[in-house]
Amino acid sequence: MTAYAALTSANYKAYVRERVTLFFTFLFPLFFLGIFGLIFADQEVPDSGLPYINYIAPGVLSWGVGNAAVFAVAFTLVQWRRDDILRLIWRTPTGAGSVVAARATVALGVGLVQAALFTGIALLPVFGLELTSTWPLALPVLVCGIAAFLGLGLLLGNVADTPEAVGALGNFVMVPMAFLSGAFYPMSMMPDWLGTVSRVLPLRYFNDGIADALSGRASAGQTAADCAALLGFAAVFGLLGVWRFRWSTGR
């Protein structure tokens, strides 16, 4: 078994054994879906004929998937570093690339399962999500969005030294982003200058790409632009995270 395969298996087993992590990954976003879905039940967006859930669900989905990717990677790195697991791996021929790739593989798989579960529940009659013909364009955006937030999690996991610090830094970044990127609050209701500022936030492109695909507004060109922006964030965060990578606390 290769180092990558062994680390991927270890990451997966550690992930499924954490009940609290599973709750916040799969059930917590559904809590927000339930709240917003029931509040805006049977309401349509003017001039579109689509239910409001088509605009609410993408925001909650993109935030939930991004949030899970950030915290899963960051917490794993900090815990493994604190427990000296990374230092033990460092003494083997395994490189940092295998550690990062294994964690990214598990996080990508989890994100895809999250999206499938979330969308399946949103399609139930009680919520009434309607898939338009452009919904497949959400898939590349989903993969690129997960990559961007994996990079952010890698960076935070190498900046923080304790799980408490990960929680503080992660929430400091993710909570404001949820409101400033249009995930929880429509961009049309924000000042123009704030809409401009939101262009430096990866969640803006993640949410826009998913929302456009599910509402029928997406085009191949716009989807490619959103994916390019997300991959740009992934590259920047990933390179910074690798640069800051530490095998043990204090190194």
Image (tube, helix red, strand yellow):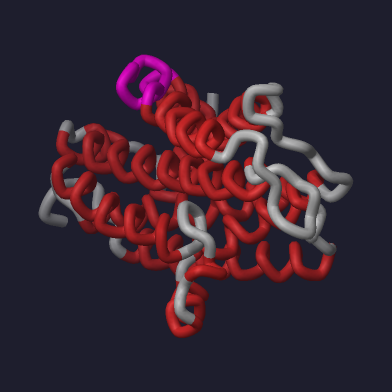
Residue 118 x/y as whole percent: 59, 30
> Which residue is at 22% across, 45% downward?
167
Residue 145 position, x and y percent, is 57, 53
In the figure, 222 relative to 165: above or below? below
Image quadrant where one finds the N terminus: top right
**Which residue occupies 37% across, 42% down?**
73
Q: Position of residue 199 (x, y in %)?
A: 51, 75
Helix, strand or loop for the magenta stretch, by majority: helix
Taking depth in this image into account, of 31 and 1 the one nearest to the observer is: 31
Q: Is residue 225 visible?
A: yes
Q: Residue furthest bottom?
A: 193
Looking at the image, residue 18 lies above or below residue 144: above
- Quarter of the picture containing the C terminus is bottom left
Locate residue 97 relative to residue 240 in the image: left or right: right
Q: Which residues are magenta?
A: 13-23
65 left or right of 155 in image: right
Q: Residue at x 53, y 31 (%)?
A: 38
Closer to the camera, 237 or 69? 69
**Residue 101 painted magenta:** no
Closer to the camera in the image, 205 or 227:
205
